Image (spheres, rainbow, N blue to C red):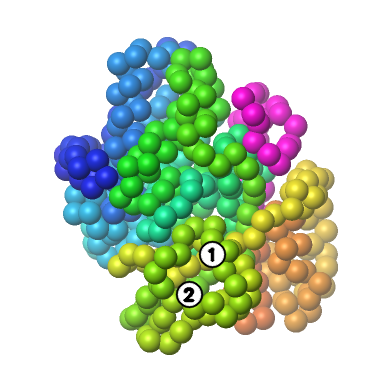
Amino acid sequence: MSKVYSEALDQHLEVERHIGRIKGSEPGPCMIFFGGIHGNEPSGVFALNRVLEELKEQKVPVKGSIIALAGNLWALERSKRFDKEDLNRVWTHERVAALKDESFVPSNEDEKEQEEIFGIIKNLLETETGPFYFLDLHTTSSETIPFLTVNDSLLNRKFSQQYPAPVILGIEEYLDGPLLSYINELGYVSFGFESGQHDAIASVDNHVAFTYLSLVFSGAISAESINYDHYFESLGDLSGDFYEIYYRYAIEKDERFLMEPGFINFQKIIKNQLLAKNNGKPIKAAGNSTIFMPLYQAQGNDGFFQIRRVPAFFLRLSSLFRKLRFDRMLRFMPGVRRDPSMPGTLIVNQKIARFLAKQFLHILGYRNQTLDKTHLIIKNREMNARNEDYVHEEWYKERYITKPKQH
């Protein structure tokens, strides 16, 4: 049992790995929520505990299973982001392979947490019936409106467009080893929700609203069984726009990064505006843009991101191209070859295949990472999608749109 403290609520809560669990009386989805993957983000833990307690007290009919898991218990108990390794950066292919073949030997507290969480996920996938939904609750170090961070698969897009909040696509290209990238590559619906600043009371309330809406959208509970309109409206931003990340300022080891005060998520910035200092040297905006997740905490190596809105035309075009499997033509183009070690992955020689612009690869459903100065590794986001698991769900039957449904 770990004791977790919320500065926002000025409350302590004793939790185990399973914050709570509800088994419905009828078949339905398996909803798996994570709270506190980062130990300085207790909001999700308190919100999940509240929702499960309310569902039980009010005897709300549930279909399927609802499972709420605490993330880094060691770090949560100490209000630290992590011990030695960020628990949301260690789900690499190499680490997951070692966990699967049981060759992995934890060497610090964060790795012990990962090993236990991996075992729980594996067990749930073997013992529960789907469809599965994995939802990760987070907060940010700067002020923000609520938003979703989504690996850009059509499944994720289609489910996430139901929420009255902005959707940020493509963060997985800039991060090594996020938990949800591992789960996405298994083919399941999975994405993150950022509810607000770490210690704001509104962050807990937004997490509660998000959890209830997720349960309704998946069919686990009915909208009529809760105060649905209140939760839908309380998230605040009804635009539902899609954005993509196109730049990340990475902090290298032993660098002294200091963000300039006052920046908030989705704030417009202008060319040559002073954003931060690193080792005393100024970091200025290269052009007019929108800043995203500026770093205002001691731990972490993401200084800030920059984002731009994705036009509806590109969303529709990418949906059409992916359904038509237009990407199959890529491997026959000059400068492109298959990666023999990894299915669904191509290696692109940018000196030869200059025509393959990053945005074009995004339209086709590929995320990319740099292998060296001249080569990109591109991986198909749609290859492992378990569309057949969700084909009978109400949200899946809706025609693809770019705005959230108004309920």
Left or right, residue 382 beside residue 194: right
Q: Is residue 388 magenta?
A: yes
Left or right, residue 205 beside residue 39: right
Q: Nearer the viewer, residue 99 or 255?
A: 255
User: What type of secondary structure mainly makes up the magenta span?
Assistant: loop
Write down the residue under mark 2: 275
Residue 387 shows which numbered tag?
none
Q: Quarter of the image containing the C terminus? A: top right
Q: Amino acid at mark 2?
A: Leu
Q: Nearer the viewer, residue 155 or 332?
A: 155
Q: Nearer the viewer, residue 196 or 119?
A: 196
Q: Quadrant of residue 333?
A: bottom right
Q: CA distance from mark 1 to mark 2?
A: 9 Å
Q: Quadrant of residue 43?
A: top left
Write down the residue under mark 1: 291
Q: Residues within 10 Å of mark 1 (few under 14, many from 20)?
A: many
Q: Nearer the viewer, residue 247 or 185?
A: 247
Q: Amino acid at mark 1?
A: Ile
Q: How far from the left and from the top, in percent, is residue 314?
A: 77, 53
Q: Residue at x 28, y 53 (%)?
A: 39
Q: Residue at x 25, y 62 (%)?
A: 83
Q: Is residue 181 above or below residue 173?
A: above
What secondary structure is marked by label 1?
A: strand
- First to last magenta residue range: 380-407
